[in-house]
Image (tube, grey):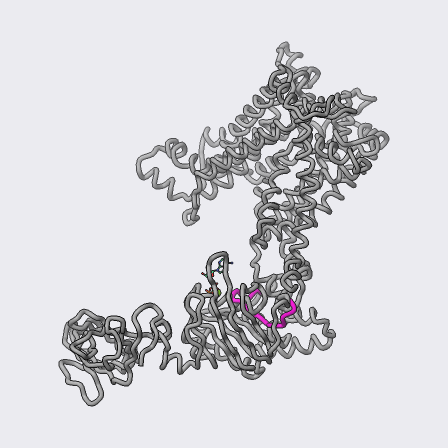
Amino acid sequence: MASVEIAGLRKLYGDVVALSDINISIPSGSFFTLLGPSGCGKTTLLRTIAGFHNQNAGRISVDGHSIEGLPAHRRDVGMVFQDYAIFPHISVRENVAFGLKQRKISASEITKRVNDVLDVVQLGAFADRMPHELSGGQQQRVGLARAIVIRPKVLLMDEPLSNLDARLRVDLRAELRRIQRDLGITTVYVTHDQEEALAMSDTVCVMYEGVIQQAASPLDIYLRPVNKFVATFVGANNFLAINRSGSQLVLLSGGAKVLGSCVDATDIVCAIRPETILAKPGSVAPVGDEIAIPATLSNVSFVGREMEVIAVTDQGETLKSLARPDPEIIGLSQNSSVTLCVNRSDLAFFEAGDAGGCIG
Amino acid sequence: MTSLLRRFDFWTVVTGAILAVLVLLLLFPIVRVLMLSFVDADTLDWTLGNYVELFTRNYYLKGLKNTLFVGVLGTLGACLLGIPLAFFTARFHLWGRAWISTLAILVLVAPPFIGAYAWIMMLGSNGFITNFFEGVGIDIPTVYGAHGIILVFTLKFFPFVFLMTQTALMAVNKSFEDAAENLGCTPWQRFVKITLPLVFPAISTGAIICFVLSIADFGTPAILGRGFRTLSTIAFAAYRSELGGLPTMAVTVSMVMIVISMLALLAQRRILSKRRYASSLTNLPVKVKLTGWRNAAVHIFCHGVVLIAMSPTLVVVYTSFLKTKGPVFVGGFGLESYGRILRTAPEAITNSFVFATAAVVLITMFSALISYVIVRRETAASGTIDFLMMVPYLIPGVVMAIGFVTTFRSGFMSGTSAVWLLIMLYFIRRLPYGVRSTTSSLRQIKPSLEEAAINLGAPPLRAFLKVTIPLILPGLIVGSLMGFITAINELSGTLILYDSGTITMPVSIYLAVLDGEFGLAAALSTVLLLCTGLCVYLVFRFTENRDSAFL
Ligand SMILES: Nc1ncnc2c1ncn2[C@@H]1O[C@H](COP(=O)(O)OP(=O)(O)O)[C@@H](O)[C@H]1O
Ligand SMILES: [Mg+2]
């Protein structure tokens, strides 16, 4: 257990900037997730912590001690690899014991600790199998057991579930989190799956093009994204154009007045989460603090738990709504007119552009 | 301070050590040969005179022409046998296909000079085929001279073309051929317009290997030449006659051989760079079942080719069991020849095994380290090492040995013993076999396995020994066996370096052939063949794709 501090970290591959000015502080025992699209630098950051890359600038400290200059084999950070990296030529037991043997721990202690950890990952019965006799999920557990049995200060996991099928992923996700909590081990977890990130983490750190966009609790990330990239990448979002009408800023579609007249309208978009939009049949006036956007129905798909409504406004903007199934809407024919209703408090505003900041 | 320390990690040190060894054993001798070729043997001044002499004197020009002549025609012959053979085995149901490729591989690895003297026993002035035809009143040409050398090259080197083309043919997506047929091509047009161009890169690679080996071959022209000289025999003779003085003409001839090999390789690079066909194996080629006379003809051709190519080996083994009295065969069978090698040349056998084994131990160790540096470390140094691994293929044995002599037998290293020179020569010349096999093995291993070991606390060397080595072991073993086969069969370089105490089996065989001691030569050759065959068997055991393990 240890806290991790990363300050001003920078990493280049030739001229390619893979990480620029990374600053992170991870409290002891917490579950910290790096979330971002493929190629944003997650693996690079993780491998730099593990000591497989040398940073070009910046400092990584564990428990206040810089680990710069420590070669990878002396960093004492456990790593779970995306492709498992289970040694194919030795048994499960020997795989798990590998790190302990490097640490010159007595044979009896090794046996005990290997047995214990195999029980923790529920592989006790598989100790003497060879890796190729295990399923993907079992191999991933071996990878986890092998990394945690050495009681590392920090545990690193690079998309450990991405090679597994969907059901298993959800099961293992909960199990991973349980084990991490029980051991209280500081964990840096990499994923490009936002659901996984939100479900497991104490802190989610969203990255894009080598830059940290936002690091916050899952709820904050979802409800209060600091910029347009986070708003787009985490959860779905509709973005609507904003127009200036006299001294007022209004939505292009429907013309509802929004915001004050603080900023230049051409550079602002309005974000509305699909689940905050309620579609009503016909033309409906806004009630209370609501805004109403008239539109024509383009498609309704009923997927069981909820229905997904796609509607196009008169101005040609397409919006998506997710709501409890409503037989009236599902019964409508295509091109029927509908009204999309949203609470003003559910609107968010961003500067236009890929990673435009949040306004208001 | 810390960054300085980090720069001197384990693999950096290894990379440096490898580079040092390659510079000492590979670049030094070659540069030395290059420099000597510009030195006047008498005045020791810099001069272009050696090259002027080479390109004006008929003796050398004839040698150059002869070399290119037998090289080109031998390569052509190898293609004429290898391409149809590959096509037949890849596209037709053939009885005994595994047998054919096994024989081809045996031909490939058999000691190169055995072919030459076995053909003398068959078609020489006193050969049994010659005598047979004489008996029925027909005079057939003997095997001496250019045509004999071409015959031996053809039969010796066609397996390269065969195996490479066959591998490529098996990987041609059948959809291409189907499309051609669908567009109206007859089977023959389809073969010429689609299939042949698609496998051309493989054919050209095989052909270039044949050509380079033909240029470098010493044993065949030395045994069969009878006045027909090639550059390798000229270089050897020049070295012998210049003994005592500076071997300037020998190294000048050597340089010309190196340049020819390099030009061939560059040509090959150009051919390949313009033709890169990505192949997706969605639609594998199918084999056709032939019937009637075509079927018979194809079978006769395929089995005939490999049997004829194999015949020298069979003749050698057969001859070794003939009853002899001194150098003459007295009729009937006997073990006298084996008795004689035990009496006259036991040290040749032990020397061969000791030198080859010592070289292979080094080859194994260096192959493991070098392939790791090449595959896992993307630095300028590792790129250089990768490139240097190609150089020994291009340097004929005679040339490398002359380089060794001029480098390590002069100045402060003049005391280097023949034993060490021979071991180092075998090591550096056969190292690429080990490296290539090990490298392709290592490319199959995910780097994350080594990283996992390091992450768990193993220092780089221990991670390498405990994880990488066990995983690349099959490739390492195959590469080492290949190194062993080729090291124990080395003749041309050994002839230049050996002294009375360091004679080897190939040298003994060569000398016995020159003395007309065919029984003795046959018995020694059989011993060599036996251990070569054993190695081939072991390679088969350790490799999945047996045909390409030997290329
Ligand atoms: N060894 C490397 N050499 C050069 N560029 C690399 C290397 N590894 C990664 N990159 C580049 O760095 C960026 C970040 O890669 P990576 O950390 O693997 O992203 P992620 O894990 O988030 O998908 C990418 O643009 C990738 O192309
Ligand atoms: Mg990644």
Residue B96 at x, y = what percent?
56, 38
- Which region is colored magenta? A73-85
Residue B442 visible here: yes
Q: Quadrant of residue B72?
A: top right
Task: Please name whichever residue, B308 or B24, is drawn nearer the observer in this view of the structure.
Answer: B24
The quarter of the picture where residue B426 lies is top right
Asked where in the image residue B98 lies, by quadrant, the reply is top right
Q: Position of residue A146 (x, y in %)?
A: 61, 72
Looking at the picture, tell me which residue is in the foreground, A44 or A159.
Answer: A44
Is residue B229 toward the left or the right of residue B93 in the image?
right
**Residue A80 among those drawn in magenta:** yes
Seen as rendered, the residue at the extreme right is: B343
Q: Is residue A286 above or below residue B128?
A: below
Question: Can the viewer see residue B526 in this picture?
Answer: no
Q: Point out the residue furthest to the bottom here.
A: A288
Q: Residue at x 42, y 48 (%)?
A: B280
At which x and y percent is residue A216? Answer: 44, 80
Q: Is residue B102 magenta?
A: no
Which corner quadrant holds the N terminus of chain B? bottom right
Identify which residue is drawn at 75% across, 40% down: B423
Q: Nearer the viewer, residue B180 or B357?
A: B357
Where is A313 relative to B405, above or below?
A: below
